Amino acid sequence: MALIGLDGFVTTLTFAAAQNATTITVADPAVCTSLGAGNHTYLRVGDGTYFDSVRINSCMGGVLTLAVPLPRAYPAGACVRFVLTSAIVCELIGSGACTSICTPVTLLYGSSFPDVSPGKIYSHAIVLGGTGPFAIVSDNLPAWMTKTVTGNTVLFGGTAPDPAVDFNASIVVSNCGGASTVTVSPTVCRCEPVGI
């Protein structure tokens, strides 16, 4: 079953289509000839307010069979057209399997952690690039330091104990289901208050 592009195809619904309909009837039955037996395409149905992209699995005499039920009702005369959609692009790239395209995680900002002051509140953030969601895979952080992933930011916080000590931190963050990682390994130094 091949994907067929119907560049420039535009028609209208001959009859109103109910919500959850599994077929729609279009005014221009030439779509069936263009589609051919055993092939499929994607069309967009719209009424000026709403639109839905639907996969067409078969066609006969202007009656199009949908892969899944129509999500909403459309009146007779609603526009039906071929539009290049992400589903088509994914199908072409993925050879039939529409998978998410994932940009690997990168560190955009925050690789240098600030110094730690004993008994003081500590706060730092690193900003990540790439496709979310992001996850912390592993870390080597002191017990007092918290870490939270929020969107594309990893927030660090807590109150350093007294006496604070220098430490080598490391954190590994992943995305793309673990296929991509970035490691941040700063040395965080103890900063004594002025006058000590």
Image (tube, rainbow, N blue to C red):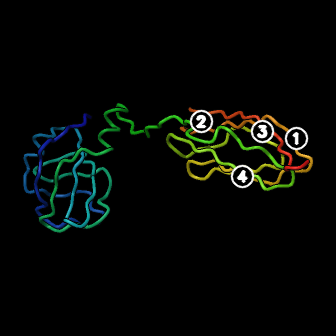
Q: Residues within 10 Å of mark 1 (few under 14, many from 20)?
A: some
For label 3, the residue is: 188
For label 3, the SS is strand
Q: Which residue is depicted at the point 58% across and 37% down?
A: 107
Report the quarter where the N terminus lies: top left
Q: CA distance from mark 4 to mark 2?
A: 27 Å
| Mark found first going from the N terminus, 1 or 2 | 1
| Mark found first going from the N terminus, 4 or 3 | 4
Q: Which residue is depicted at the point 65% across and 38% down?
A: 111
For label 2, the residue is: 178
| Mark found first going from the N terminus, 1 or 4 | 4
Q: Nearer the viewer, mark 4 or mark 2?
A: 4
| Mark found first going from the N terminus, 4 or 2 | 4
Q: Is residue 44 left or right of residue 13?
A: right
Q: CA distance from mark 3 to mark 2?
A: 27 Å
Mark 4 belongs to which amino acid? Answer: Ser
For label 2, the SS is helix
Camera-side residue of 114 and 13: 114
Q: CA distance from mark 3 to mark 1?
A: 9 Å
For label 4, the residue is: 123
